[in-house]
Amino acid sequence: MRILLVEDEPELALWLSKSLARHGGFLVDWANDGLVADRRLQVESFDAIVLDLGLPGMDGYTLLKTIRNRDDRTPVIILTARDSLTERVDTLLQGADDFLPKPFRVEELEARLVALIRRSRGKAHSRLVCAGLA
């Protein structure tokens, strides 16, 4: 599973990339700037995006709005130190699929990523049923 990690703190990004690869088997690509992440998302496909809100270039809110306005349905989990109820509700209403405040346990992030990817893949393969015909 290929993940785009959009995080401006290099030490956290390196640790998280290694942890997700080692424990969850994820292939993690890293962007440290919202503009760089946006350019990559226009030409590359990812199974999920882990997005910080406080980013240089383009903040996480703007990046989220931009990709959703493009009808990019890649699952997005917000990973941020901003943990107010308003922040959580606003990002979910703007198109985020999940929200995990820092500090966090990597095991929980892995489980949330797997669940998001599993659900998004289920929607991509719609199943139509009429009586006994599927």
Image: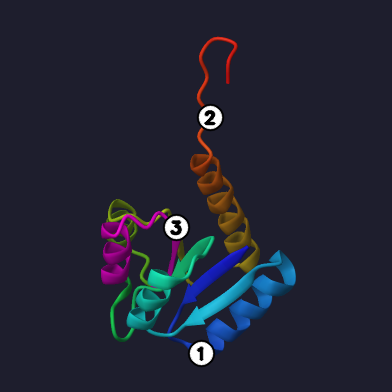
Is residue 42 visible to us here? Answer: yes
Of circles 1 and 2, the one toward us is 2
Separation (CA) of disc 1 from disc 2:
42 Å
- Is residue 71 part of the magenta span, yes or no? yes
Picture coordinates of residue 38, whole percent (x, y)? 35, 74
Q: Are marks 3 and 1 in contact (CB under 8 Å)?
A: no
Q: Which mark is residue 10?
A: 1
Question: Left or right: where does residue 130 sit relative to residue 15?
Answer: left
Is disc 2 placed on a helix, strand or loop? loop
Graded by Cα atoms within 10 Å as few (under 14), some (14 to 19) or many (20 or more), the crowding at tag 2 reads few
| Kind of residue indicated by mark 1 | Pro
Which residue is under mark 3? 74
SS class of the residue under badge 1? helix
Q: Earlier in the sequence, mark 3 or mark 1?
A: 1
Disc 2 and disc 3 in contact, CB within 8 angstroms: no
Give the label on residue 132, or none: none
Residue at image location 37% in from the left, 77% down from the top: 39
Residue 8 colored in magenta in the image:
no
Residue indicated by mark 2: 127
Q: Nearer the viewer, mark 3 or mark 1?
A: 3
Looking at the rendered structure, the kind of residue marked 3 is Thr
